[in-house]
Amino acid sequence: MVFQREKQNVSASQLLQAIADADNIFLSHCTITGVLDINRLFNPDEKFKTESLSTIQGAKTRTVTLTQSIVFDNCIFEENVVFAGPWAEPESISVEFKQDVIFNSSKFKGQVRFRNASFGGTASFDGCSFTGVVTLKNAKFHKDAKFRTAAFESYFLATNAVFESSARFANTHFTKGANFLAARFLGHADFNGVYSSSRAVPAYESVYFGHRKFGADESFWRFVKQSALEAGYYQMAGECFYNERCARLRQKFSGYTYKEFSPTKKTWRLFSGIKFLPELVFGKMLFGYGERPVTVLVASAIVIIICAFVYSAPDMLVYRSGENQPASFVQGLYFSMITFTTLGYGDLYPNPHGLCRLIAMAEAVAGVCLMALFVVCLAKKFSRG
């Protein structure tokens, strides 16, 4: 059976009965009046016929399985849309959608709750506008989840949500913030063009990206970075910038389609990735993309100490005063420091015979570069905003 309407007012009770009868739902340009709440089906006072509804009653949770396709095209929901347990018992009901669930270009004037829901087919909310709170806590999306160009005027909650395939949020607008705590993006995640207009930084602690090694998290960190900058959280913005650049580097090396490459192409990609080695060593590991000044200090200290050991070896340094004795480690450290900083008092100089001059030249060049990197790091961190 098919429950199909176009450009009509449809009551939530009619829709719920059609859902209970396992009818395929196809509504276009309709207005749904009343509360579309799955819990009403189990209220004896409502007197719905639920003989065809597939339910499994567990110890604490009732699982409702909907096997039909559900399509709402450009519809308006006047009140709450609830496919979850009531607020008092949020874990009491779990809804499983076996087919595609489409709400494209629809407008939700109340709350939208899909807590603990499982989407076996495509879940599409492209172009939707949400006036109330949207809850997807603990929801599982087994196929594509689409929220492109959606507008969330209230809070968006996706704590512990699992996106097994692609999660597409391109050009989505979060007005009052979003919560992605412990969310798991196991496929491609697209957050390009996503923005927040209320200076609300999205919560992202413990977020997980299954394709992180392919750079799938780049657009997500760009979104969080922009939100943090607008809210004035510059340190957070710096960390997100670092994560974004690291993701970009991984994406340039492998890309989203790396898994589909043949072994020969993967080998060639590995060798061609040598051109990104300077960025890996200097940009990420040493410079930290301007967000790790302490790393530059540590690298400087390592260079100075290693060279100090070299200079303290016999016949490496010459005293201008004419003394003929091997330099101690302290003297080697002193000479290494003034060489690194290109200061050079002239009381010691490298032995003109052997490799000491070459080592001193290399240390001087390293010192100039590392000191410049350190200054740039500090300027970048403290001038942001």
Image: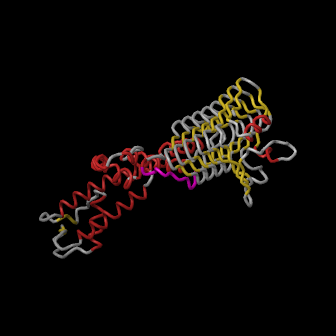
Q: Is residue 294 left or right of residue 73?
A: left
Secondary structure mostly taken by the magenta-highlighted segment of the chain: loop
Image spot of residue 183 (x, y percent): 58, 51
Image spot of residue 78 (x, y percent): 76, 33
- Identify the residue at the far top of this view: 7
Q: Give the residue at x 70% y 36%.
A: 23
- Identify the residue at the far left of this view: 353
- Vertical comparison of 323 with 26: above or below: below
Residue 275 in view (yes/no): no
Image spot of residue 377 (x, y percent): 42, 50
**Quadrant of res 113:** top right
Q: Nearer the viewer, residue 132 or 378?
A: 132
Q: Give the residue at x 74% y 41%.
A: 20
Q: Nearer the viewer, residue 83 or 112?
A: 83
Query: Which of the image's four quarters has the N terminus?
Result: top right
Q: Which residues are magenta?
A: 204-213
**Residue 378, magenta (yes or no):** no
Q: Nearer the viewer, residue 78 or 83?
A: 83
Q: Nearer the viewer, residue 68 or 90?
A: 68
- Identify the residue at the far right of this view: 45
